[in-house]
Image (spheres, rainbow, N blue to C red):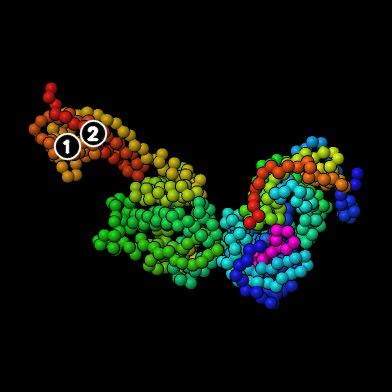
Amino acid sequence: MPLKYQAEIDAYNASFNDYSEVENKIAFRWTFEQITHPNNFLPVTKTNPSNKKAFEHVTGWALSFFETQQQSKARLQYISEDKPKAYKKLGTHIAEGKLQKTDGICQIQCDQFGHFNFFDYENVDFTPNFQIKEQVGVIG
Amino acid sequence: MIKFDSIETLHTPFSELKEVGVLLFSYYPTTIVYVDQNNNPIIKEWVDCTSDNSTDRHFYFKTSKGFLKQFLVGEISHLDLINYSLDGLVFFQDSTGNLLSPFSVVSVKEIPLSYKPTPAFKFDKIDGVDTDAIFKYFNLDEIETKKPTLAIVKNISQTSNSEILYVHINRGKGVSHGSINTEVFGKTLVNFDRFYKSIALDTILTTNRGEIHLDAEVNKKYLPFTETVVDHHRIAASFGFLIKPIVTQASLFEQTQSEIIATRVFELINRSKVKETLKDEYMLHSGYTINSYRQFLDGIVKCHLNIDLNWFNPVNRKEIGDNLSYIDANRIVYEIDSLSKIDNKEFKAKGKFRAVNCDTAHFTFVTLNEDQYTGYFDKLVKDLIEDINFIDIYEILISRKIITEATKKDDKIVDTIMSYYIDTE
């Protein structure tokens, strides 16, 4: 099945050996208050196209998730200690959902913060499968 | 986005900038390092955006390779890096796609609070994105950060032609770059001053001296050797201050009193870190000095301080340095305490009072076997001692403290009468 941004991703000539499909994998993602917010399930290359750095690596076209709610919250709070307005850019809430085989390919190994990348397939809509779990910050 | 007072500037404050790399974060590049045409690092900080994410706000500031290195190795916080903007200014710019607003300039002090990192936020390599590239570009491995501070101190010592002790509190409660909690500073300074004065008095009067009250007129002669002043100089450090003797005595050929005192201060600190040498060092100082050193260490432990101490003599170029972490301090306090011990015991005695001072509650008591005890009545019984006579035989309960100190040949005995009554048997 083609990935959502297959044409752009092809330009990187990247290997996806450390990615695989997953079933019922619980995942957490930074989102805005309304789960239908247009930026909630877009990769950074789409949410912040002026960010040249995002285009340097194929992961700029992936979605970021965390293994646990706590890890997701801790990381967002940590960044906001350095940038108090980061919630406006990255999200104010934590949403939880399950990733399925039909959703895309998942990075097998997460990093030490519980973060992993996920390349979604074409036409996948995460909105119905994710629910807001917790508010972490406010847009002030 | 926040509106705040700034001055719009029509000209570009920086020569042509080239991006070197992203410092923070991989999720979104909030801090980016650039270089200007003169090879100076310029930092660009993302600070805000409109709610629809269409416009971003950044500010730029000039920094030095030294400050950049200090930030990257965790010596200074992100807030410090910004506050140490080389010209004290930051230049704001809003960007909407490729459309850039004119720059507006504000002092670092006027940056809105919500645009500043929290004071404790320090760089962690794990958060870095292009850290290696930034190190390599500016050759930061070759930049020394700590030593220049000492070089500055040496220079101050030479310029003022005075021996100088540099006390650098590099970590602890309420300690950040260039600032320190007032109470922590005050207590540390006072504790160190007591310790220094005590060593000075031991040096001048020997360790068999009694307690010296330096505010007494008769003791004014000791002030030139014991008094120091805090010398104000702005030094880039977590928090550092300079202490110098009140009287300059620098001499090329012989040790000055202040050099002897400083040497003894450092010898005690150094040798107290090892159990075996602490015992030897303990014997070389008066009880007053050991107590004041213990108090200084106690303060370090309570405030979780790490302190570097460096002393310089501008004439003979001698320098001495050492450091004390709160972990060192805690261990030394334990070892000092283990060299002293207090035994308590209680016993009864029968005899007559020979003297009783109703004002001070001091007594002299002679037993039927002619043993003599002196000491004080306990607080709980001293109000009734006016009724004591010197004819009746009394039975008294004495609480005895036997204090063994490594610095003293003999044990110190303190007797206190806890209760007494006329023996009617």
Name the residue at 62% across, 61% down.
B115
The quarter of the displayed image where residue B86 is located: bottom right
Task: Kindly identify which residue carries mark 1.
Answer: B384
Name the residue at 73% across, 63% down.
B55
List x then y, in percent, for residue B128: 70, 54
- Graded by Cα atoms within 10 Å as few (under 14), some (14 to 19) or many (20 or more), the crowding at tag 2 reads some
Position of B71 with respect to B402 (left or right) is right
Frontmost residue, B379 versus A11: A11
Q: Callout 2: helix, strand or loop?
A: strand
Name the front one of labels 1 and 2: 1
Residue B411 seen in this snapshot: yes
What number is the disc on residue B42?
none
Q: Callout 1: helix, strand or loop?
A: helix
Q: For the residues marked 1 and 2, what is the alpha-carbon distance in whole angstroms?
A: 12 Å
Q: Are marks 1 and 2 in contact (CB under 8 Å)?
A: no
Q: Mark 2 belongs to which amino acid?
A: Met
List x then y, in percent, for residue B380: 23, 36
Q: Which chain is mark 1 on?
A: B
Give the magenta range: B49-66
User: Residue B61 lies in magenta, yes or no?
Assistant: yes
Name the residue at 71% across, 53% down.
A90
Q: Residue furthest top?
A: B425
Q: Residue furthest bottom?
A: B11
Image quarter where the N terminus of chain A lies is: top right
Task: Kindly identify which residue carries mark 2.
Answer: B418
Frontmost residue, B206 versus B346: B346
Q: Which chain is mark 2 on?
A: B
The quarter of the displayed image where residue B254 is located: bottom left
Q: Mark 1 belongs to which amino acid?
A: Leu
Image quarter where the C terminus of chain A lies is: bottom right
